Image (cartoon, rainbow, N blue to C red):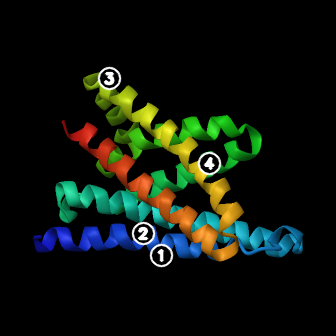
Amino acid sequence: MTRTRALPLLVVTAAIFVGALLQAATAVPGLGRAAPVFFGLAAGASLLFLWGQLTSLTWAILAVRRGAASVRLIPIAAWSGIIVLVVGVLLVIFPPGAVLAGVAALFVLPGASDGMGRAIPGAGRAMRRHPWRSVLLAAGAIIALVALAVTAVAAGLFLTGFLGGTVMWVAFGTAAAVLLTAAARLHEK
């Protein structure tokens, strides 16, 4: 392994495991009965952790593929923030829409390093160049999300509290890493 790939791979691992630990810590039992201020703080912390996890995971996957020097972090952080906010609002208003926004994020985030105005056109170009691969990626993402939702319910039944949350978020982080890697490959070809 070259030195240029060691740091991004370490960041991928840290984004998955540290992110899972932080997310599990915000889902403590009894939080739903807590005062609204504490619940709001925990929800805000969870969104902030999710934004950091998505930003670092996207940067690291692109840095492994392109080299760390060619990946711009600020546009990735901005698009990650936009995506977390859109998905969060859609989860409250119309939950199935959050799934579609998450799938769209797979196509937008790999192009985010090219700049704020180039992410969406880059996603469109990748889908036009590889329509069948794009459909397979979207279908795989939806299947993975359904399978992970079932796994999360099972983990909640058998592994409660912090341990169950950690296992669930490690599974979500790993699936996100695999799907983002596939999406990054789609953008390069």
Q: Residues within 10 Å of mark 2 (few under 14, many from 20)?
A: many
Foreground disc of the pair 4, 3? 4
Q: Which mark is residue 132?
A: 3
Q: Earlier in the sequence, mark 4 or mark 2?
A: 2
Q: Position of residue 120 (x, y in %)?
A: 40, 36
Q: Residue at x 35, y 29 (%)?
A: 134
Q: Residue at left 62%, top 41%?
A: 98
Measuring from the top left, give residue 56's x and y in whole percent.
Answer: 40, 65
Q: Which mark is residue 15?
A: 2
Residue assigned mark 4: 150
Local SS, label 4: helix
**Label 4 – label 2 distance at C-alpha:** 23 Å
Q: CA distance from mark 1 to mark 2?
A: 6 Å
Q: Amino acid at mark 3?
A: Trp
* In contact (CB < 8 Å): disc 1 and disc 2: yes
At label 4, which amino acid type do we have?
A: Val
